[in-house]
Image (cartoon, helix red, strand yellow):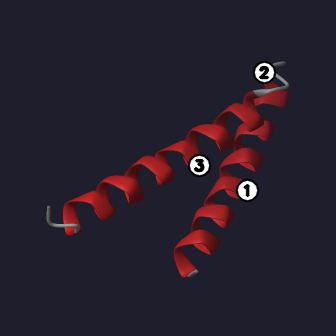
């Protein structure tokens, strides 16, 4: 559960930072793009980490 909370907080922070940078540069959707990219990275990382620990 702690990993999910950390991922959610990191995604919100990335969205806020991306939104601030995007609004300054007239790219209104940059916050959403950053948030989705961060969450996608977390999903890929934790799936690969789980697969490495799962012996077949």
Tell me the element at label 3: helix
Q: Which residue is mark 2?
A: 25
Within-10-Å neighbours for mark 2: few <14, some 14–19, many 20+: few
Q: Which residue is mark 3?
A: 39
Q: How many marks?
A: 3
Residue 30, position as x, y percentages in the image: 74, 29
Mark 1–mark 3 distance (CA, rounded to whole Å): 10 Å
Instruction: Determine whether 52 is above or below 31 in the image.
Output: below
Q: Which residue is mark 1?
A: 12
Q: Quadrant of the C terminus?
A: bottom left
Within-10-Å neighbours for mark 3: few <14, some 14–19, many 20+: some
Direction from residue 17 to residue 2 in the image, left or right: left
Residue 25, position as x, y percentages in the image: 78, 21
Between marks 2 and 1 in the image, the one whose residue lies nearer the viewer: 1
Q: Residue at x 79, y 39 (%)?
A: 20
Residue 8, position as x, y percentages in the image: 67, 63
Between marks 2 and 3 in the image, the one whose residue lies nearer the viewer: 3
**Furthest-front residue in view?**
56
Between marks 1 and 3 in the image, the one whose residue lies nearer the viewer: 3
Of the numbered discs 2 and 3, the one sitting upstream in the chain is: 2
Tell me the element at label 2: loop
**Furthest-bottom residue in view?**
2
Of the numbered discs 2 and 1, the one sitting upstream in the chain is: 1
Between 53 and 38, the residue placed more toward the observer is 53
């Amino acid at each position: 559960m702690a990993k999910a909370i950390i991922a959610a907080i990191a995604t919100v922070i990335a969205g806020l930072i991306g939104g601030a940078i995007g609004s300054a540069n007239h790219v209104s959707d940059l916050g959403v793009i950053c948030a989705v990219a961060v969450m996608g990275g977390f999903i890929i990382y934790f799936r690969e980490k789980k697969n490495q620990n799962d012996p077949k």
